[in-house]
Image: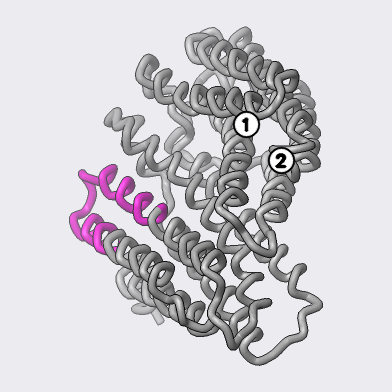
Amino acid sequence: MSVVAAAQFRSDEDKERHSSWLENFYDLIVAIVVAQLAVSLNQKIISNVDYVSFVFLFVPVWWSWLGVTFYNTRFETDDLQHRLLTLLQMAAAAFLAINVVGGLSNNSVGFALSYAVIRTLLVFEYLLTGRRVKSARPLTDLYSKGFMATTIVWFLSAFVPPPFRFYLWLASLAVDIAEPVLFTRKLSNRFAPHIYHLPERLGAFTIIVLGVTILAFVDNIATHNWTLPSILSAALSLSVTFCIWWIYFDSIDGSAIRAFRKEKRVAGYFVWLYIHFPLLIGIVGFGVSMEHIVLSNPDLPLPAADRWLMCGSIALCLLSMAVIRITSLRSRSGGPTRENSRERNQAIYTLIAAGLMLLFSAMAVNLLPLHLILGIAVTLGLIVALDIRVHPIHRVKAQSS
């Protein structure tokens, strides 16, 4: 795509636009980081400290990916300069993967420097875009200054001993996450991401995370001494993963972006965007718990930590997907009443299912592993069945056959 096209701020916003090969390549590198994060979480006995550490490290990983994605959806030119900078970001992401295990202990310096390099390269891209596209300069100046300030903090943190190093990380991330919200209120909504491109990027990354969790699951249980309960537990765990895929991809679209761009609905747009973070956290957490339930003693109830990780992760996924549906519903206020009603009902069903998962976490103390995963699979299967029953696409296919 030419620089002239970038200068027009994607005048083809109503036309479909797909991820580039370079973006897909970058996603795969970040997926390695996510896989390493899952490894760091996958302890024999997962404590609250282990989980909080995992979530804390996941924030900069996800934010670094989101920063690159947002730049690409607005200004990607696919020229030599952009390709080289992106490849350098991928190299830094590879070092991020190396250092994420032990990222809060012996590898914290390497983790901080790897993340800082990714963000520095992103700042360079915004600066270069501001020089080439004068009409974009209000946006590029704000982002480059804001991101550079927090990136300097990450560089400096490498020379500060723990735990103060991590306090700097936390403060920097809080400012970074708040900056887009503050900047958006100052700038016109014409700077909003592409209606089709950003949902596709989020969807592609969600698929990759789902695939990474299944890969880790298969790899870790490959040498297991299989029994009938463990086979059934594995099959039901995979069915839950498929249900998560189904529920998410029957609700994701660019409605929240369209409402922000045309109706200036800022809150719904940012809720839709940021709710993907707990969704991804839930997917990875469930992926780790899949292995634990298959390898557990089938004649004994799951330990409390494993039960909470599994049910809590599914509840987090369902809650996130319900919120995605709600934000889409609000952005379709001018659309067909029947479609709004369907989205509202599906959101309610999904929220009820999330509540059931939390009940399983608290009350299924004596439930055997196979029975627990069966209850989860049946619950999500019902959500999918309800979606199939009312979704326009599935109804049309059923009628045509």
Is residue 385 placed above or below 98 in the rendered structure? Answer: below
- Can you identify the residue that label 1 sits on? 68
Amino acid of disc 1: Val
Contact (Cβ within 8 Å) of mark 2 with mark 1: yes
Horizontally, residue 285 falls left or right of residue 199, namely: right
Q: Which residue is mark 2?
A: 26
- Residue at the image position 37 percent from the left and 23 percent from the top: 189
Q: Nearer the viewer, residue 16 or 301?
A: 301
- 133 sits to left or right of 42: left
Residue 60: x, y in percent? 61, 35
Question: Dot 1 lies on which element?
Answer: helix
Q: Amino acid at mark 2?
A: Tyr
Location of residue 58 in the rendering, given as x and y in whole percent from the top left corner: 60, 42
Magenta: main secondary structure equals helix
Residue 240 shows up from this direction: yes
Q: Provide the residue span drawn in magenta.
A: 320-346
